[in-house]
Amino acid sequence: MADLLIELFSEEIPARMQAGACDALKRMVTDGLVERGLTYAHAQAFATPRRLALAVQGVTDHSPTTREERRGPKVGAPDKAVEGFCRSTGLQRDDLEIRDDKKGQVYIAHVVTEGRAASAIVAEVLDHTIRNFPWPKSMRWGSGSLRWVRPLHSILCILSREDGAEVVTLDVDGIVAGDRTRGHRFMAPDKFSVVSFEDYAAKLKRARVILDPVERADHIWNDASQMAFAAGLELVEDKGLLAEVAGLVEWPVVLMGRIDAQFLGLPPEVLQTSMKEHQKFFSVRDPKSGQITGFVTVANRETVDGGATILAGNQKVLAARLSDAKFFWDNDLRAIADAGLEGMGAGLSAVTFHNKLGTQADRVARIEALAREIAPLVGADVEVAATAARVAKSDLRSEMVGEFPELQGLMGSYYARAAGLPEDVARACVEHYQPLGPSDSVPSSPVSVAVALADKMDTLTGFWAIDEKPTGSKDPYALRRAALGVIRLVLGNGLRFRLAPLLAVLIFDQKMCPVYAAGNWDEQDLVALERLKRAIAEGHTFASAMTLVKSELKNTEVSMVVFQEGDETVELVASSASAAENLLAFFHDRLKVHLREQGIRHDVIDACLAMPNNDDLTLLVKRAEALAAFLKTSDGENLLQGFKRANNILTKEEAKDGVEYSFGPDPKLAETPEEKALFAALDQAEAAITPAMGAEDFGAAMQAMAALRAPIDAFFDAVQINADNQILRRNRLNLLHRIRATCLQVADLTRVEG
């Protein structure tokens, strides 16, 4: 057994590529060793800005000798076929065995592959790894053809055993592997040799290099936290920045500075974002006020003045950066003082949202109209919600968001307060983007919920109207995230409304945009269209809504372009209905994923989706949760089996007889006590289920269903369904229909597995 140590020493590797490079090095080398017959016990990869390292413990010294028997062509086959078989095995024709087979004699090759020394295999694997390494970006240098993320300087590759270390013989475009490496670029640049991984890591640390990125990150965080605590401050946690900074230094030296007083009036998020994006500084805040008052920077070397010169230079650059941020902030506040927040957003009319969906200003107008419709459904003030919708995107035209796009929404909330708008409006500016992902929080303020729903539903219906749906793994407009956002907003706030009519109206509006622009519409035309949309929103189908509007306008002299045979608008109505159904199915797919993550089986969800009003998401989830809980009980499992037995028998007999046994069974024809008991149990269950369903108490309805378990089991054990007496047979089949109809009131149990 031996331990393998590899180091690939180069110019600085970008921090964002280091973690992926570690994974790739470990995977490519270990997979290559195993494919060639070597085994190992454990492997771990490391990265610093200047090196990738891999330590593999317990590598076998040789690959095993293998013997393989291969079947070749038939005896008498063309010479070219036999010669090709010989080449593939490395044997001569005289080395082949002739063996009898079912269809005649065939050639058999006995291929022996001799084992190889670990050093030869490692050299082969590492050469392939270096030449085919999957860097996101790579470069060539000098006159060679080798590509690496930055110029590769040296290769360390040794196999360590108890009796010493063996240097693996390897030459990659003139870079010869050895047992030597270098320490820190400035503090310990001299070369030194190593004999094992432990020796390597220890000597690197003495040479001012911390090999493990996790150790570097912990060192940075601990030093920075203690430094801030000693000053009565606290470090703002940022795991992404910590990982990035740990990838920028080999020997982290933490320094803390203060922010100039002239910049302390900036919003904390502006200070934090500016320092993070431009300088890779950590923010330090006053725990009492929450104000960002200082910063932490991480140098890559120790200095004789304790980092004073480095800190002074950083503070000078930071002052310039924060001066820019202050300039943007002051200009934005002046713009709001002059024209208000809506005035700031006026420029959105010059910003294209999508070439088929208009400008950002067009979108804001649609979101405002939709927010007015949604506000009563979520308990929000209609006018406040409309105001929030009008200004929620205004900060996209601010100078601050132009410089820091990640602050969109957040800056809108600051500007809304500066403009004297209600706090609900300010909150909606930032919260209407939420939830941004499955782990993001869901807003609960009614105004924020109304605008957030309007924003996401406008996005979804707009791209559905122009047929830009997600396909496979491609989702360029983040429509899956938008749908999940709508679902979480509805469920998180317990909202009750039907999606289907609303989606149909919105898609129709989006599709009508070019027709409105091109057509010569008079006032009565537009009134008719608005009535058409209202009818759809009230639950009418497109066909009945069209008929309704026609009948209302039959005595008017209006050129109804909408209702002219073959008119484009009629086609838009039909395609809107189809697109709305498709979009609702998309919502259901997203809901399935969401509920599966919460432990609700797909078949349970499908059983509930088959029920009426499946576009009321809160009702749908309430039903699915109750059914899932019920099926986990013994009563639920057994009742399901009884239902399936009744349904299977009934379905089979209806198909055989060509009739539907749905006529009410007569209890007077019941012969056995078990049959009479089932009639009584069904009467009792239906008396409890009907009001429970009316009250949407699915748990109570299923509890009433559970009482049917024993009577149904007893009925099947004691009663012959297909009796010789046809009157009794029909009555019992009608009784099975009653069992099925009773159980199907709660969910479509035919879709439940088991």
Image (tube, rainbow, N blue to C red):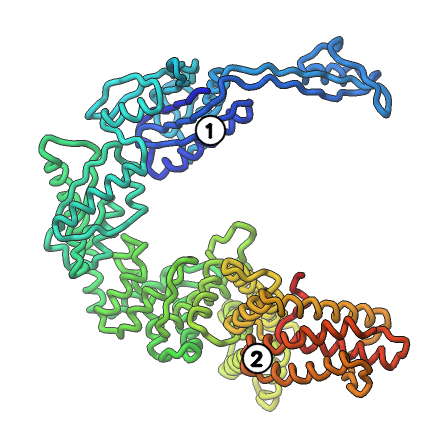
**Mark 1 — residue?**
41
Q: Position of residue 463 (x, y in %)?
A: 50, 61
- C-alpha gap between disc 2 and disc 1: 66 Å
**Marker count (numbered):** 2
Q: Which element type, helix, strand or loop, lies under badge 2?
A: loop
* Residue 199 placement: quadrant: top left
Is residue 592 found left or right of 477 in the rendered image?
A: right
Residue 666 vertical placement versus 610 (above, below): below
Query: Measured along the vertical axis of the image, is residue 364 above or below residue 126?
Result: below
Residue annotated with mark 2? 539
Which residue: 71% across, 15% down? 86
Q: Quadrant of residue 732?
A: bottom right
Give the residue type at disc 1: Ala
Q: Residue at x 37, y 60 (%)?
A: 351
Q: Tell me: 312 left or right of 422.
A: left
> Which of 502 and 110 lies nearest the eye of the viewer?
110
Mark 2 in CB contact with mark 1 (< 8 angstroms): no
Q: Amino acid at mark 2?
A: Gly
